[in-house]
Image (spheres, helix red, strand yellow):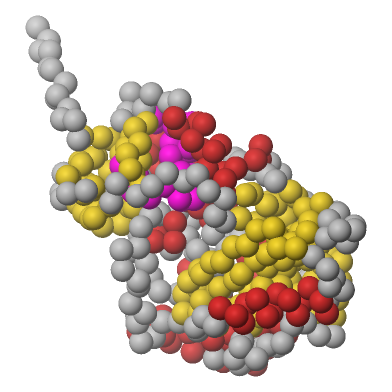
Amino acid sequence: MSRQTTPPIRSPHTYDAIIAGMGCAGLSLAVHLVRSAWAKDKRILLVDRERKDRNDRTWCFWEAGAGPFEDIVHRRWEKAWFHAPGYSGLKELRPYAYKMIRGIDYYRACMDVLEGHSSVEMRYGQIEQVSSTADAASVRIDGTDHHAVFAFNSILFEPPVIGRHELQLLQHFKGWVIETAADAFDTSEATLMDFRPAQQHGTTFVYVMPLTPRRALVEYTLFTPSLLAPGDYDKGLTEYIHSQLGITAYTVAEEEFGVIPMTNHRFPSRKGRVLYIGTAGGQTKPSSGYTFRFIQKHSAHIVDSLLRKGHPFERGGWKSRYDWYDSVLLHILQHRKLEGGFVFRELFRNNPPRRILKFLDDETTLPEEIRLLNSLPQWPFMKAGMWEMIQRLRR
């Protein structure tokens, strides 16, 4: 005679998964989860301090083919300019396209998927703590603990403590969406990197994303140890628009500002039943600051691990050599062994864009990497490479 067992009764605060933070990483993971078979008969809680209902940022990234958020791509470009002192070129990006997603479109699209899904509950309040025991993860919201089988945390409660043998630069940027009275932009061609602005602060470039013939996003970007005075960003944008774009009459329709850490600090991947995602989980590319595509790959990997293993903790493919490449370039830039504009100029002058973008996505083969690295000055990179190898052994 078989014995029947009664399923355990869930308390109101018991979930299969809690996602702390509803930014890019949290919402991406939630969408990947509910589109998978794993979410059937599951309870997922998403938590953030407030609802995302403002166009507070723009994500630009390259991608081959259609991605999971293809329907909300605001603009795309298959050709892009690269400029640096001594070299300029219009690059054919295919099979990649450079894509732009506006923050507000992303938030709305994710909410449309999640709010209509029976597995999902959303809550807004102050996230005070994310912790784990042997049996459950816990997220404290406005003084009340909510428990789950697993928790996914995208929140950096404290800035990372950069170790003695680790590197960190800040990628900081200010962007203006400008409008002109007459046609001023070719909407089929973006500017991916323009290193012609002054480099006195460190690696400095501008990118330009034409939205219409009379409207474009112009972003002034730096890789430096510290931020500039607020007026310096405006000065850099104004000078670039006047001197390089040749535009003197325009209005600023929108503006954005952001800071992204570029570091080889080893962010924790998990703690007990808590898995870290987004920048908190090391998904920001240390040498470029790009995050959006790495978040999508990480989200897909988490779902795959849940489906195959029953938990989200299976490690991804071997990335050690890419981590080392990132550390070497960070070393070069942080210690100014070579100017950033010079390094990227040699990359774009001597390699097809497909190889460079594939490399920056951590998807190249070793022979492709050798060809790419051989296009750079050998001695500075060899010294930086040996130094970073020694530091990796000390960490």
- Horizontal side of 83 relative to 4 (left or right) equals right
Tag count: 0
Instruction: Specify whether residue 288 is painted magenta.
Output: no
Name the one closer to the observer, 175 or 394.
175
Q: Main secondary structure of the magenta part?
A: helix
Instruction: Specify whether residue 30 is painted magenta.
Output: yes
Across and down, in percent, residue 3 comes to 10, 13
Question: Is residue 245 positioned above or below 291 on the image?
Answer: below
- Residue at 86 percent across and 58 percent down: it is 181
Residue 349 visible to an observer of this rendering: no
Across and down, in percent, residue 323 comes to 50, 71
Q: Image quarter for residue 255?
A: bottom right
Question: Is residue 231 positioned above or below 110 on the image?
Answer: below
Residue at the outermost top position:
1
- Horizontal side of 10 relative to 60 (left or right) equals left
Question: Is residue 70 positioned above or below 169 on the image?
Answer: above
Name the one closer to the observer, 357 or 171.
171
Q: Give the range drawn in magenta.
A: 18-39
Q: Quadrant of the C terminus?
A: bottom left
- Residue at 56 percent across and 37 percent down: it is 109
Residue 39 visible to an observer of this rendering: yes
Residue at the outermost right position:
183
Question: Is residue 226 positioned above or below 379 on the image?
Answer: above
Q: Image quarter for residue 233?
A: bottom right
Across and down, in percent, residue 42 comes to 32, 28
Q: In which quarter of the image is the N terminus?
A: top left
- Horizontal side of 213 relative to 255 (left or right) equals right
- Residue at 45 percent across and 50 percent down: it is 23
- Residue at 83 percent across and 68 percent down: it is 249
